[in-house]
Amino acid sequence: METVFRPFETMDARRLWEAANEDPDWPVRPRTRSAFFRLVEGLQSACTLGEACLEALEVDGRLAGFCVLQPVPAPHLGTLAEEGTVVEGGTYLASWARGLGLNAQVKGRLLAAAWEQFAAAWCVFLVPCDNRRALAAFARLPWPHLMETAPDNGRFAPLLRRREWEEGRPLAAVAFSRGTLRQTAEYARLKRPSSRSSGPTKW
Ligand SMILES: CC(C)(COP(=O)(O)OP(=O)(O)OC[C@H]1O[C@@H](n2cnc3c(N)ncnc32)[C@H](O)[C@@H]1OP(=O)(O)O)[C@@H](O)C(=O)NCCC(=O)NCCS
């Protein structure tokens, strides 16, 4: 299985939208085609400026999904902003690409970018609480992480409350701390993307 990460193109947005707009686990907030394309355009511009990452994932030459990473605005973080930059990640795998072990490759690449490109203190994923598959997939990853919901009133509570209000459903924050990961052998594996990956050379 040949896995390649490459810059996300407008054609990818078209193909994924057609395949995914019936998917209940489609993780992207804009649920209309035009809003989704505007979001992609904004992210592509931010990538060009080095302010976000948006990549397509190909498996054996076939578009398998995408991943995204962008800094969370400090005012959305409450006192967590004092700990440093927080980046938010997202992953989408087409249904045929799930269960193949790709999730760890994608998350490893996002975490490497979080630490190296953004010097982030935290990398967080906001997952709907009823998305049992995504939550189970996080539990299988080899890197330590914390999981919080708004009633926990933890460090991600301000961000969770804001995003729950926007999305109208309960979310869980799954968060990876660079400080904690540094103490594990697994951190070394996150220093560089896999040699089989292609992508922005600044990684
Ligand atoms: C979330 C996602 C990236 C995970 O990748 P994946 O390849 O499906 O993940 P994995 O197969 O490694 O792990 C999924 C686990 O959930 C389990 N699972 C599958 N369906 C499940 C369900 N309905 N309830 C609970 N667990 C479920 C699987 O059995 C597997 O665990 P196991 O291998 O221990 O049995 C992928 O499913 C996806 O893109 N989903 C749509 C988008 C999304 O939900 N994104 C989340 C935002 S980060």
Image: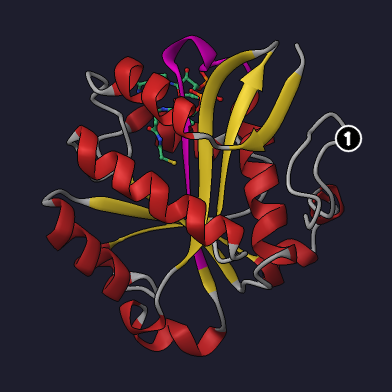
Q: Which residues are magenta?
A: 87-100
Which image quadrant: the C terminus? bottom right
For the residue pair 122 and 89, the one nearer the viewer reads as 89
Residue 106 location in percent, x, y? 63, 37
Q: Which residue is mark 1?
A: 195
The quadrant holding residue 184 is: bottom right
Q: Nearer the viewer, residue 149 or 108?
A: 108
Residue 175 in view: no
Rendered image quadrant of residue 10 = top left
| Circle 1: residue type | Ser
Total residue callouts: 1
Q: Residue at x 17, y 36 (%)?
A: 32
- In the figure, 147 relative to 71: above or below? above
| Mark 1 crowd level (few <14, some 14–19, many ≥20, 10 Å Cα) | few
Q: Secondary structure at mark 1?
A: loop
The residue lying toward the viewer, choosing from 187 and 92, is 92
Ligand 1: give its quadrant: top left
Report the residue at 41% width, 37% height from top.
Answer: 135
Q: At 69% from the left edge and 45% from the top edge, which residue is drawn?
A: 109
Whether 95 is among the magenta residues is: yes
Residue 9 percent coordinates (x, y): 52, 34
Nearer to the camera, 73 or 147 = 73
Q: Quadrant of residue 122?
A: bottom right
